[in-house]
Image: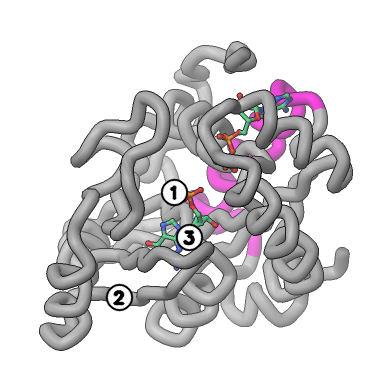
Amino acid sequence: MTPSTPSVDRSLPSQADGARRTTGRLFIISAPSGAGKSTLCRAVRQRLPDLRYSISHTTRSPRGEEKNGIDYHFITQAAFRKGIHAERWAEWAEVHGNYYGTSAEFIDRALGEGCDVLLDIDVQGMEQILKRYPDSVTIFIMPPSLAVLRQRLQDRGTDSAASISERLDNAAEEIKRRKRYRHIVVNDRLEEAVEKLTAIVAAGRTGRFNTAGANLDRNK
Ligand code: ADP
Ligand code: 5GP
């Protein structure tokens, strides 16, 4: 079952309300697979419609209802490798046996146009992006527990037992690295998690927290 998400809140600040910036800002969201990152990103994008979303490239096959060019750009391993040689990726990583990469051209064009961008990428990708774009805002989504995470992956019904088991093994490792993120949001009750995540992104857009060294001084 897909939980329902809150509707658009037009009272939230858009980028135009924020400090006068000539370039946009990146918002990086990571989470163990199944923690609800796609669900939360969809909800935040609904609430902040002028936030651009970086559609990643991946060599994995589409899952469930996923559509090429909307959820991911699904490409071959050969095309992905070609992209590495052509320096097409702002970051790339191997995750769960597949390759994933963020288009440098998309990011640089959006930032150049003064647009803020949401990235749904893993911890390895976050570290690469931070080196290249140090004032990015980093957010880690936590499942309430590993047992709930397993249940969500099983209920989603899109992954094989072997894939679920690999994702759970990786989750423990990913969770250990959560302290590298400035913000942590626990996705227990969906509505509450959407509120928190939207508030963090909205605050980052208006510069209501200091992002210089943001990823060094988190106090959680
Ligand atoms: P991810 O993108 O992190 O892999 P998804 O967004 O696909 O995760 O969520 C995994 C499953 O958990 C989906 O079936 C989704 O509907 C469900 N889900 C997400 N958030 C919640 C929540 N807060 N409570 C209950 N189920 C949730
Ligand atoms: P999934 O296959 O479940 O959609 O994603 C698996 C993992 O890959 C998730 O942790 C997701 O955040 C990550 N991911 C998706 N796109 C990218 C990307 O472009 N770069 C990196 N490094 N990770 C990505």
Kindly identify the amino acid type of the residue bearing the numbered disc 1: Gly
Q: For ligand 1, which image quadrant applies?
A: top right
Q: Residue at x 26, y 36 (%)?
A: 70
Task: Tell me: is circle 3 under 8 Å from ligand 2.
Answer: yes
Residue for badge 2: 90
Q: Position of residue 59 (x, y in %)?
A: 29, 59
Q: Earlier in the sequence, mark 3 or mark 2?
A: 2
Residue 196 vs 105, above or below: the answer is: above
Residue for badge 3: 121
Q: Earlier in the sequence, mark 1 or mark 3?
A: 1
Instruction: State the image quarter where residue 219 is shown.
Output: bottom right
Residue 189 vs 161, above or below: the answer is: above
Q: Position of residue 189 (x, y in %)?
A: 79, 25
Residue for badge 1: 18
Q: Residues within 10 Å of mark 1 (few under 14, many from 20)?
A: some
Q: Earlier in the sequence, mark 1 or mark 2?
A: 1
